[in-house]
Image (tube, coloured by chain):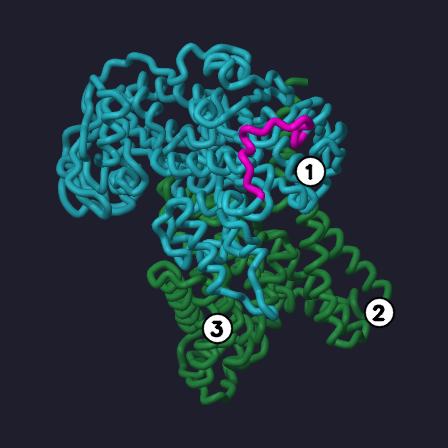
Amino acid sequence: MSNQTPKTAQILAKSSSRVGILLSLTLLGLLLMMWIALSFSTTTFMTANNMTNLARQGAMTAIIAIGETFVIITAGIDLSIGAVVGFTSVIIAWLLTHDFSIASSVFLTLMVGVTIGMFHGFGIVKLRLPPFIMTLATMTALRGLGLLMTNGATISITNDTFTNVSRANFLGIPMLFWAVILVAVPSYIFLAHTRWGRYLFALGSNREAARLSGVNIDRMIYVAYTLSAVLSSFVGILLAMRIGIGNATQGQSWELDAIASSVIGGTSLFGAVGSIQGPLLGSFLLTTIKNGANLLNVNPFWQLIITGVLIIVIVYFDGLRRKRS
Amino acid sequence: MPTTHDFASVLPWQAEWVGDGAAQQKVAPLLLLKNLDKRFGATHALKSVTLDFTQGETHAIVGENGAGKSTLIKLLTGVFPRSSGEIFWQGKPVSLDSPQAAFDLGINAVHQEVVLCGHLSVAANLFLGDENTKFGLLQKRAMTKAAQKVLDDIGFSLPASAVLSDLTIGQQQLVATARAANRGTKFLIFDEPTAYLTRQETKQFFSLIRRLRAAGITIVYISHRLEEVFELADRVSILRDGNLISTDKISETNETKLIKGMINRTIEQLYYKEQIPAKDEILRAENLSGQGFNNVSLSVREGEVVGLYGLIGAGRSEFVQSLFGRFPRTDGQIYWNGKPVNIRREKDAINLGIALVPESRRDQGLCLNLSVGTNINLPIYERLSKSVFISPKLEHNAADVQISDMQIKTASRNALASSLSGGNQQKIVVGKWLNHGAKLFIFDEPTVGVDVGTKVEIYKLFANLLREGAGIILISSYLPEVYDLSDALHVFRAGKLVASHIGAKPPYETILSEAIGV
């Protein structure tokens, strides 16, 4: 008896902290319900073709949502994600059309992501700009820079080895979905099992307490924004791979999809609450709505409305649950 | 005395209905509570309290944290509805079911922390929600003039156009009080109003309260500082565990009686202190200068409490911030165990073994929405990790050791820090430095807003730390506390160390005049 009580309390306390297992299960249930409903109401949903399509569509949102989650956990925001995706699609396309090897092109593009993230960190830490302003500024500036570099034109990628990867499967699963796993597993380990992950939460919860405890909060800000920008540039590469072009206007308003996925997955915009499975589930939920609406021939304008309503409903009920516990 | 309803007549003693309320004794009490009861689910917060407040009296309410004082205030100001019982206002039953209902009767409250708009001017704050308008346009000049009259009357030498956040906390508290007393208020509740005020500001504040009382306003005064109760109150009521223990005229009670009533056990000594011999020197500052302080020399030894006293802005906080690496020194030298050291950032101080327990545990000390365990381990994650990975076993053990050593009452190490009581939260803020092995603890106002029982626990914690060979620097704006607890007492004024008393201390008055500079 005396053994049991603290154990129950422990489980309860654990589920109320960070992102509840309950929310994850609810989202998973919702996702499965949608899949079942769609497979009964359409003949085209539960087909191998559509499922791989869904996995490919959801993959890119999932990866940027994970990046955004790192930033939101620190109580910050990254508005530049869509612009970074578009900009880096131009970079990789330019590199590939200028006879760089695939490996060095990918590496250099990711380094561009690192640079952008470090620049965000610099603006927030050294210039003391609010994250909203700093990333808003690069959001417009990077679009401009990308358009300037290409004169507003599109760069077509002729390297078939590169573009074929996006259509390839490995063990029956699309390569793009493997990319999600490649990102999600290390991200989970980083966030939940390393001290830097712990410091991100501490920074988001109480910056001053973290500082007084000896946490190098400036460094953690650099880390969060660099992770976000690197993952965005990775998605820029994946996008270029998938559509075979580099174009600075790609990825329009993707940052909003990333924020929505993260928030649906239980990340708190006030910081210190978030997980990796949350944005994963959130992004595939959003993608399923879009995919399903297409198959059901729903007016695409409704997709936007449904997504908006869903964000309000899920976040409202999650807030209620948190308050009660 | 002005007799018009001129807009300038905003304070009660300027208005025509001024009467010598203190002398009046009406038949029916202004406010009467009969068997007032409040339950929150299973918690019985207030148990059948019967209490009266007469017109024009100052009625103090004392009790430990959780005794039911806040619940009582919230019932009186209409924030919560009562569970049962009756409330009579001037003999007539009233419902008090919303803040507006309380406000309409003339019940108002001033809280511990100033709840005003820092970006607006003093005048704008004084008239917020009750602006003087003509054809929907603000009459700024008239309001500033009226506000200036109020300020002059309080004895403020400040322009009413000053921005509120430029004022000291004490001045802001005076503005908050003037605002609360502003519009037909007959019943004014103060909840720990002096918690953040210096001695001088408290004095100014008290004279304002006395004037309000003289104007016939009934005052309910809640404070942990008993000598304030004796200075201000006509009557005093004690609450304990939701029960009303007693209501006495102030002349018929004393501090010992009050403390006994509050905690139902006598504390022999209010400022618990053990005689612990001082040993080797831990830290010495020689001619240290930095932002906000100049040429300060002092030392801390093992087993010693070094008190720093001074008014707010005297440079004490700036000095310790510099020891902790927040603002690096510009001149002088710090010695740690006799060796010169260079503290440039917080991390340097922490690595040496300096711990800063900040003034506000909620704002600076704790990550409230993280677990108790994470909070305890935050300074030592490097030690709990193998390369970059946290070892769950080491992490859990380190947290559990402190939870049991410090007797932190928590469901588990995974419970959120926000779910703990104030005293237990304070234990986390201290406990996280014990695993780290800190040698010098800097406590900045450790007992602000803390009840008598928890205070004694904090003082016992000091004794434990000292016995283990640590040294303590104690900053307090509360002279009796820092006076009784310190082995060496240093007085700051205007960024300078003006007096150092090691061993024998001169009387209060001397120290006070050193701090004020008279």
Q: Label 1 crowding class (10 Å Cα cut-off): few <14, some 14-19, many 20+?
A: some
Mark 2 or mark 3, earlier in chain: 2
Q: Are marks 3 and 1 in contact (CB under 8 Å)?
A: no
Numbered range of the magenta stretch: B17-31
Q: Label 3 crowding class (10 Å Cα cut-off): few <14, some 14-19, many 20+?
A: many
Label 3 belongs to which residue?
A139
Measured from the top left, where is residue B66 in percent x and y? 58, 26
Label 2 belongs to which residue?
A43
Q: Would you identify the image quadrant in which residue B477 lies?
A: top left
Q: Which chain is cyan?
A: B
- The disc placed on residue B80 is 1
Q: Which chain is green?
A: A
Residue in the image at 73% along x and 31% along y: B91
Q: Are marks 2 and 1 in contact (CB under 8 Å)?
A: no
Provide the chain ID for the residue under circle 1.
Answer: B
Work out whether residue B238 or residue B384 is closer to the camera in this orientation and state it: B238
Quadrant location, the C terminus of chain A:
top right
Report the amino acid beneath label 3.
Met
Measured from the top left, where is residue B5 in percent x and y? 57, 54
